[in-house]
Amino acid sequence: MPKRYKIGIIGCGIGRLHMVEGYLPHPDKFEVVALCDLDETRLNVMADEFSVPRRIRSSDELIAMPDIDIIDICTPPAIHTALILQALAAGKHVVCEKPLTGSLAEVDEVIRAEEKAAGILMPIFQYRYGDGVAQARRVIESGLAGKLYVATAETLWKRDAVYYDNPWRGRWATELGGVLMTHAIHLHDMITYLLGPVQRVFARTATRVNAIEVEDCVSASLLMQDGGLVSVTATLGSQEEISRLRVAFENVTFESTHGAYSPGDGPWRIIPANAEIGGKIDKLLSGLPPVSRRFSGQMEAFHHALEAGARPPVTSIDARRSLELVTAIYHSSDTGADVALPIAAGHPKYTSWRP
């Protein structure tokens, strides 16, 4: 019989979504037994709502609990690295919200720690899950799509002063970045998930919407490793919120749904070059099983990996690729240069992408 893993969640903000969308839909696979938050009121409200027995103010105490299998980290970004390293050292499996770390140096430290650890680490990239993105990936991997021509990725969201009336948002030291880091990072992960590695980046960032330290507008041009071109746009000043990925291949064009927080959902528009290609795509997708959306899909895949003793469905290497793109965009914006990837130790922003 498959194991039912015991979960401890640190952070009851986004942690509530992990509970509602990720763990509650799979009661045979997961049981949240402990919650941790510095805000006692928020902690008690969530624990009462979901009848979670243990309510803890100290992350040290939670991580030390011997019966907890998985530590789920949903804190503000600046303390992710320390908590990941502590949980891995304690022999736990770890789930962590984005961004995984605050620099490429830190993510490389985490990767080395995971290699020696008993547990495995899964970063959160829930936009990879849903029928739409699953079908597009199936077609691309089959080779039917052909050569990549161009793609556009738009994260057009709205955040105002009320959102930033918070002690950690909008600050380099605590949020680690702006729209690029906290909001667009998911759609940008979908670019590399579907289209492969980035080769070069040219970008501009600006702060135009809110009175904050970090950027809230981004425009970037990516050269993919296979020669395809990708345009990236993000803002927190859009009066209509959408997330949209449109990709033009030799034989097919894909366009995601426009759901701001669920672009992986189906149905995507699939526009074949001709009837013959369309028939082949229909046949290829006819047996594709449904894919649960967002956190539910990712947690279900995580359970399968744990039971199989396999790598998690999203890995620390995936997170590094995401943060490498972030680093390149910030470096290009700061210097006005076209930035080559990969980025390794010795690069000016390897130890920090902050200005």
Image: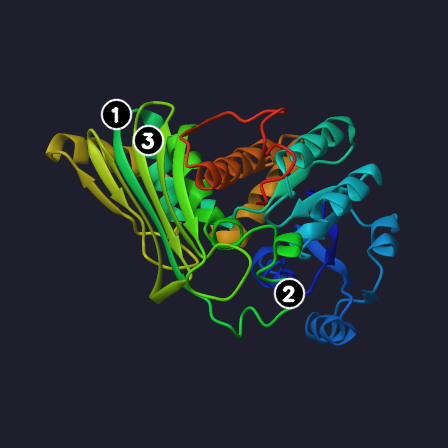
Residue 58 located left or right of residue 292 = right
The kind of residue on which mark 3 rests is Ile
**Mark 2 and mark 3: span between their CA atoms?**
36 Å
Which residue is at 81% across, 43% downward?
86
Dot 3 falls on a residue whose secondary structure is helix
**Residue beneath label 1, please?**
147
Residue 25 sits in which quadrant?
Answer: bottom right
**Mark 1 and mark 3: span between their CA atoms?**
10 Å
In this view of the protein, which residue sits in the foreground, 200 or 204?
204
Label 2 with label 3: CB-CB less than 8 Å: no
Residue 300: percent from the left, percent from the top? 57, 47
Q: Residues within 10 Å of mark 1 (few under 14, many from 20)?
A: some
Residue 56 located left or right of residue 141 = right
**Residue beneath label 3, please?**
140
Identify the image quadrant of the N terminus: top right
Q: Earlier in the sequence, mark 1 or mark 3?
A: 3
**Residue beneath label 2, please?**
13
Residue 248 located left or right of residue 336 = left
Which residue is at 36% across, 28% downward?
224
Residue 134: percent from the left, percent from the top? 39, 41
Which residue is at 31% across, 49% downward?
256
Q: Earlier in the sequence, mark 2 or mark 1?
A: 2
Q: Is residue 195 above or below residue 260?
A: above
